[in-house]
Amino acid sequence: MSAAFDRQIRPVYDALDSNSNKSAVVACNKLLKKYPNIILLKALKALALVRQQKVEESLALCDEVFATKPTDDAVLTAMMHVLRGLGRQTDIITLFENAYKQQPQNGELAIHVFYANVRTGNWKAAQQIATKMAKQFQDDRFLYWSAVCSILQAKDPSTPATLKPVLLKLAHRMVTSSTVPSYHSADRLYVHLLILRDLEMYDDALTLLDSEIGKLICNTSLTVDEIRRDIKKLKGLVKEEGEVAQTRILEKKDRNWLEFLSVLDATFWDVTSVPEPTEEAREACKKHITQTQNLLQQVADLDGLKDRSGMLGLLELEKRARQHGFSTDASRTLSLAEKYFMHFGDKACAVEDLQPYIAFEGDDLAQWTSFLETNKSFTSASEVQRGINVFKLVRYNLLESELTPELESTRAAEYTAAYLECLPYGKSLPDTELQPADDLAILAGHAFVSAWTQSKDEAFLHSAVSILEYGSARSKQSYRIRLLLIRLYHLLGAPSLALEHYRLMNVKQVQTDTLSHLVLSRASTYSLSALGDITYMSECMESSQIYMNNSQETAEFIVKAFELQKYSQVSEFIEFEDRLDNSLQRDLMKLEHVRMRMAHEPVNADLVDMELIELKFIFDRVHYDNRDFDVTPNYQPRCSPSFSEQTLPFGKELSASAEWLSAFLKTYVKIFQQASDLTDTVEDKLLIGDRPKPSTAPENQVPLNDRLAKRSPEEAEKLTTEEQAFYEYTTALSTWLGPYHDYVRPPAAVLLAEAAKASEQLKSGHSPKPPSSPANGSSTNGNGHYKKDEEPPAVTEPPQILFKFFDDMKERFQAVVTTSHLPPALLHIATMTQEAFIVLDAETTRFKPAAVIKTNKFNALSSSFKELRTKASEVLKEFSAQLLQLAEQAATQETRKSFVESSKSIQISSGFDHDYVLNVAKKTTDARRDIYKGIGEGITKVLKTHS
Amino acid sequence: MSVLRPFRATDAFKFNNVNLDIWTETYGISFYLSYLSRWPDLCCTQEAPNGRMMGYVIGKAEGRETDHHGHVTALTVAPEYRRLSLARKMMGLLEHVSDHSYRGYFVDLYVRCTNVVAIGMYEELGYSVYRRVREYYGSLGLGRSGKDEEDAFDMRKPLSKDTGRRSIRANGREMIVSAHDVS
């Protein structure tokens, strides 16, 4: 192209660079008048359009450019971005393939074909093109690309098992055919070793590793050293590895715990390597134990206070010796633990270091506890951590009989007193530092929660919140205190305070995947979206941003890892991408968002169609649970459930969320399927972009409708009682209405014709309709006027379970409200009942227009709906009234007073002022009032908007 | 006693106990992946035997000729695992790799001039101030120490290749440059 044209097109690029997409379109249009045949302009216009979400318009241009099979660099680059914007990754492959076919000598184009395949995880095709490139361009790099893709293909679950060794052998041939040996770089050596390991060619691998250069690489690359350890173990060279480790520990002063583990594994290898060790083997092992003991003792003496590896090695040795029946001295573990504590008892990690070894009982326990007690003192700043550790270690071994509410509250008072005593030690620290006494407040919180678990007396939770709030105010950066408060505020029915603490933790980026469960699991119970408050919905959206980033960015780094030949990272990045893409939390949030959205806005075709498509994709996913539950502290005794378990929202295990998700997905996919006009045929024709890769999981091979209908007791068990009832209710509802939906739904041909008409209008320049499917129900086309061959199905009575659901909910609500309870129990009943009402709305909208009723003789159906709706409204109105009444009673002088009274035990200690607790009481009771009021009013609103 | 192993992309799913600490920034995906796709051997983590993450270091190699060096971009240890010499071990690894694998002349790092504890630790490890960089960091909003809070010390430690120890100097604290002058 001419220099003049280059100058003219500059403004288009400038506009695109500055994200001024509208002006980019204007500039393109101007130039297109002058040069109507230059496809680069069309490609750039398509890019500007897709960036403005003008999908339909962009699509038309994109197809036009695509059909010309461009080879020009600038056009290809622009098209790559357009196709990516349209979610058509597979077409990017075709785009470059077409170009490469026309210019087979162009190595750059070949590389692009390769990268496009890598981005979509198309390992077979990527491997083929890389092999071809290796031959054609004589570059070693491509041999490794090919080998890595073969390995990845072998690992892919869709690859038949018989093909795996073939692929690995192919990879092996590639790597060994390179003119440069693999130890040329750490990452190439890594690939080579990986292949040899998986082909079980251990001797070849060891030859490489034992060479001078192999040793050097292991010395500077932890990744290669890791695979070296692996191979040695697989080869059974445990003893040799132990000797190497011993040298590293003694000569290089290496204190990597992996070396210590190697020594320990080697020590017991005589007895662990065979199913039934002989007497000789046991003798040999015994000798080895003594040697190792001497070695570890030597290390412990040498390191003193500098490093704890030697000391802990001795504890681990003793533990294993006991396991294998070698221990001669019954109290050795105890004396080692005591010694350890004397040395490292002032380190924060001393407790978790010791925990695996101190499950003492009887006399040992008594001795251990009294030893610890003599070491408890908080009289100087330097002793605080040691004193805290004593509390934690003693607490860890408490017996069940010692966990009565009385004893626990006495302990809580003791922890609180120690906390207040130690606070002054951290007084001069800046706000950015953690307070050394924090753990004492956390311990007090734990003891109160334990007392509550036993007694169900809410007063203990008030005390827990009070002491933890006090601690949080004094240690603003203590995220661990906040984690506990988040749980407790949910229990107490003060979700807004939980959210406040969560936000102060500044959770961001990938952390939203692992931590948003703290505030978003079953968040629709607390969401006031019905009243237009979209706090929780926005939280879901913001927390989901990371998944968008993942799909936009991560694949590029997989490409980068190939480009920069950091092969060790390729499968790591793939796993990372996969785990985020198929994150359980992602879809739990999605579903919560759907539930809140349905309370927020009227259920119309847009909502139904869009959510149907998304939820169907999700339903096929095999999920990874990335949620971080370990970050919440747990100082409860070993015989007791953890703090997390004790404070589970609705008493249901969060770890069972996969079953929960499955049940709710089945519910909603079914409901939307029925409410929507989008059948599979229509959806397939109208949907733009790539489909997710079909899942290879065997359970997903069953047809969708069969999978939706499948019910299992395990699944139901993971739901709360109310959710179970809801599940049964929706099942009955959709089973009942299924035939009527299927009869009235407009045929696919009609919908497709509508869509084609819309797209024609677009091409001829008319303003297009939004790219959704035609609306259902009450809109222009869906009135049931399509001639059907058969008669409409006869109307049947609604299943009684539908009415019973509302009666049961009413009964449960009354039962809960009249006994001692925490607010979430009531909120849960109310919101689940509200959800049942909304679902009823979604399921019946299609049958609302008078014409539909008349044509299909659905009068009886219509009156059944009315009857159901009246029933639901009655129950919900009553809930609403009662919740509003509770709201009025929630935040009064009396409730605040009783809150303060109930946390009296911690106020006995000096320094804990009454006003402080009063403030906590006010905040908590106010938050509780707000949620009762919000949910109560929300119900009234929903009854109006969804009728 | 801790396991020293490579830092991996998927560690981002388990670094909360380290990253929720105020001094540790959580970056976007591209930050971690761009380091790992270039210098995976300069990124490592320490793990407790029970699998909890204790801390990690993220580094890079940069510069040409006698400026070729290893750089510590992020070094962090979770609060409950401090005072265990973990930072020392991770720095040791980074120096070792910068020296023997990248053949760099020195290792450098930036630290807030107010972070006296860290500066003391680095000095103990053999680092010295090479220059002071004006307004390198954003304000912490504490207001107490003013300029010191935003200024950084560029601290360096020579490696075996720098036989003449030319990468360091005695009066580094007085050498002041602006943030624009450093990469």
Image: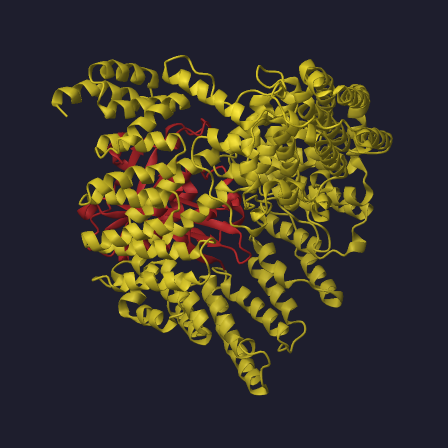
- Residue furthest to the left in view is A3
Q: Position of residue A693 (x, y in %)?
A: 46, 43
Measuring from the top left, give residue B53's x and y in whole percent. 50, 50
Q: Check the rendered structure and report the hue given to chain A.
A: yellow
Query: Considering depth in this image, is A19 or A425 the residue closer to the camera?
Result: A19
Residue A858 seen by the camera: yes
Quadrant where the N terminus of chain A sits is: top left
Q: Which residue lies most toward the front here? A: A789
Horizontal side of A371 relative to A261 (left or right) equals right
Q: Nearer the viewer, residue A615 or A7?
A: A615
Which residue is at the front of the view, B25 or A341? B25
Applied colour scheme: by chain
Q: Is residue B170 visible?
A: no
Q: Which chain is red?
A: B
- Residue A626 locus on image (x, y percent): 54, 45
Residue A679 percent location from the top left of the image = 56, 31
Residue under the point 54% across and 50% down = A697
**Quadrant location, the C terminus of chain A:** top right
Q: Is residue A691 above or below residue A177?
A: above
Residue A415, picture quadrant: top right
Rendered position, A427 above or below A766: below
